[in-house]
Image: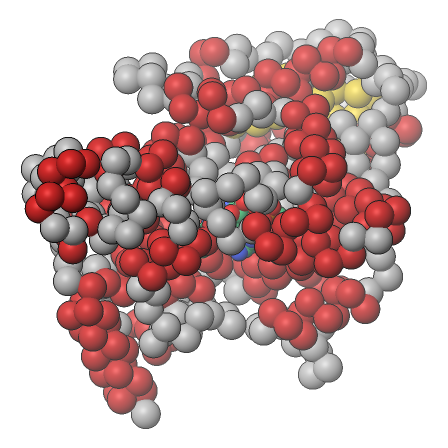
Amino acid sequence: MAKVAIVWFRNDRRLADNPALLAAAERADHVVPLFILEDDRSAAWRHGGGSRWWLHHSLAASDAALRRLGSRLILRRGPADEAVAAVARETGATAVYWNRRYDRDGRAIDMRLKSGLRSQGIEAESFNAALLFEPWTLKTKAGGPFKVYTPFYKACLAMPAPGAPSPAPRRLAPAEAWPSSESLDAWELLPTAPDWAGGLRDAWTPGETAALDRLASFLDTQLDDYTRRRDRPDVDGTSRLSPHLANGEIGPRQIWHATRLRADSRNGKTGAEKFLSEVIWREFAHHLLYHHESLPEANFQPAFDAFPWRDDPDALRAWQRGRTGIPIVDAGMRQLWQTGWMHNRVRMIVGSFLVKNLLQHWRHGEDWFWDTLVDADLANNAFGWQWIAGSGADAAPYFRVFNPVLQGERFDPDGDYVRTYVPELARLPESVIHKPWTADNDTLKQAGVAIGKTYPAPIVDLAASRQRALDAFTAIKRSEG
Ligand code: FAD
């Protein structure tokens, strides 16, 4: 009897370096590619607005790529176990393959599904596509999971190199009869009222082809200078691969091998090492999420449970809208709103401002990023916020409060990043663009800036709010001791 296999695509929507797809292509006579919209999952795990926009275009790209191989993408709504069972019934599938995910809810769904399928005599097998190394393969000398980055990094480098990525299958045998598919448009993943996605459309091209092109052009033109330019939000100095990685349109193995190859051929090792060390930060965050499954919702360091966060919806709204009166913070928040992405240095600056100067719980920041980022990723987002808050694993020490004025002057020295996203300050000279409230009246007038009218006054005093944060931290440290 002809063998029918379902490939359940999730955040691994690529044809190359996709072991689940490869298994189906090699082992089955008919392959049914399936994607399930899991909107039945709890709100905290559901895609936010930025991710939904990306998902729409990414699914369209996947379907087009599959059609070039003689196949197509079947769309169904969750619950996932019901959808997989229904498609298996309709197609007579005797095998279901997928690539693993590492979050608590996702793993629980997958484990249930695996045992359910096997009990019906259906083969169910999962593979690794999302990580360089499986989380259970890296252990400290004491045998536990790593909680500190540097030894984790060294352990990664000491591992045998991650397996080489496989090429995309040349052809996929179509289903004998295609099961029905829901319509992508009917899922209404794109914003309509209002359509806020103009900036996203200008900034991004979702899909595997665009991801591979971006990697190639980054390696050609930016890798050598990566170490020097990666912290500068005013230049295009990083890969911007994060949304492609978050959606699995490219995988870390592909990045690893292409970067190593490039470094070896050009002897440009420094940029390559630094770049791969960032990819290993991603790996670290994912391994932590696997071992500490409440990372997205609970303080990694329980001492922070007693932290006196403030409840200030007005301050939170000003931060979300980029109206705090601190230019680099407002530029970052507006870049996020307009393009669905923010430079890493600025993520740290806006994060520090929210949790330290405004004393808002890091989960407010995590939620807002989750809803607005096109690269929203459960592990990286939770890890980044806990790192900034000081409550995380190997986190920034709490007493290190970023001074957003000095950060702006150092990493956006000409003020170009602020000028791009806070155009009402564009005519200010660089000497005051990061602290317009200090400018004299003539300078403000010439630049057409009226503090409190055309641009807000700072919503907090930076020095006083820094001290307030340090006092709050001292209080929890004292109660802990
Ligand atoms: P590059 O500098 O080109 O790095 C290459 C890849 O390495 C990135 O695509 C990313 O996958 C990984 N990487 C780089 N920096 C980090 C880091 N600090 N932590 C983990 N992985 C990293 N990244 C996300 O992908 N999704 C998120 O939801 C997310 N939320 C964040 C929240 C906060 C508060 C902070 C401080 C950081 C967050 N990051 C997140 C990490 C980082 O900011 C982005 O991965 C990076 O800015 C993406 O840009 P890039 O692809 O040009 O990075």
Picture coordinates of residue 197 (x, y %)? 39, 22
Task: Identify which residue, 120 or 78, lies in the foreground.
Answer: 78
Q: Residue furthest bottom?
A: 481
Residue 180 visible (yes or no): yes
Residue at 46% x, 57% y is 384
Q: Is residue 371 visible?
A: no
Instruction: Give the camera-side residue of 75 and 432.
Output: 432
Residue 397 picture quarter? bottom left
- Colour scheme employed for the rendering of this structure: secondary structure
**Farthest residue toward the top?**
177
Q: Is residue 453 left or right of residue 322?
A: left
Q: Is residue 213 left or right of residue 372?
A: right
Report x, y in % for residue 161.
85, 57
Residue 480 location in percent, x, y? 31, 87
Q: Residue sitting at 40 percent across and 63 percent down?
A: 388
Q: Position of residue 70 (x, y in %)?
A: 80, 10
In the displayed structure image, the side of residue 475 where residue 18 appears, left or right: right
**In the figure, residue 157 lies in which quadrant?**
bottom right
The residue at the point 63 percent across, 50 percent down is 226
Q: Quadrant of the C terminus?
A: bottom left
Which quadrant of the structure image shows residue 142? bottom right
Residue 313 lies, with reference to residue 33, above or below; the image says below
